[in-house]
Amino acid sequence: MKEWFENLQARERRYLIGGIAALACILLYFLLWSPLSSNVNKLHESTAIKRDDLSWMQSASKQIIQLRGANPNRRGGSRSLLSVVDQNFASAGLKGALQRMEPDGRNSVKLWFNQGSFDGLISMLGKLDQEEGIVIKSLSITPADGPGLVDARITLLRGGS
């Protein structure tokens, strides 16, 4: 090949070298630069969309915090979490199904609920959220022996944090 190249006229060698250089530039553009540029543009667009989503979530978060604070039915956190939960289970008629209750940190409590009414449990948990600001951190419900009865393991959290 070297011999063939040397046998070419000077003008043909210049054309050949120029063509190879042009082909190399074209290949570099289409194989490297264009895909990279396209991916960078897609990432910029994706980042802009994610920023818009973040902005919306932050404003929605502020609205949620304002709405939670504006609920006049929600009581302050001065009472003990254990006493609030115990009182709500008793008033809902579920005290007999509450087998065990133990603190899980300062603002959390774990409950073991056996052979209790599913409807009563769900209603009582909703009431705790709406009136006391106590939310479900974790919940595991399994069917019990009778119709409408369940066993549940619940972790409740005051203030949702």
Image (cartoon, helix red, strand yellow):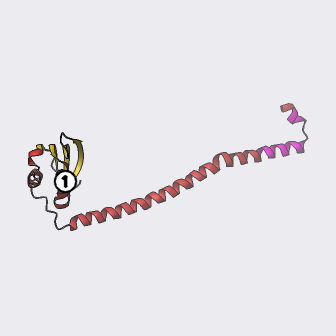
The 10 Å Cα crowd at callout 1, few under 14, some 14 to 19, many 20 or more, is: some
Residue 55 image point, x, y percent: 39, 62
The percent coordinates of residue 20 (x first, y second) are 78, 43
Left or right, residue 16 beside residue 111:
right
| Residue 110 point in image, percent of width and height | 16, 44
> Left or right: 149 with respect to 62?
left
The magenta segment is: 4-21
Residue 146 visible from this viewpoint: yes
Q: Which amino acid does label 1 sit on?
A: Leu
Q: Measured from the top left, where is residue 149 in percent x and y?
A: 18, 45
Mark 1 — residue?
A: 125
- Give the quarter of the figure containing the N terminus: top right
Tell whether position 134 is magenta: no
Residue drawn at (18%, 39%), measured in percent from left and top?
145
- Give the residue drawn at x 10%, y 52%: 93
What residue is rendered at 15% in x and 46% in y? 116
The reply to whether the magenta stretch includes residue 15 is yes
For the residue pair 143 and 44, the one nearer the viewer reads as 143
Farthest residue to the front: give it.
147
Our reading of the magenta stretch's main secondary structure is helix
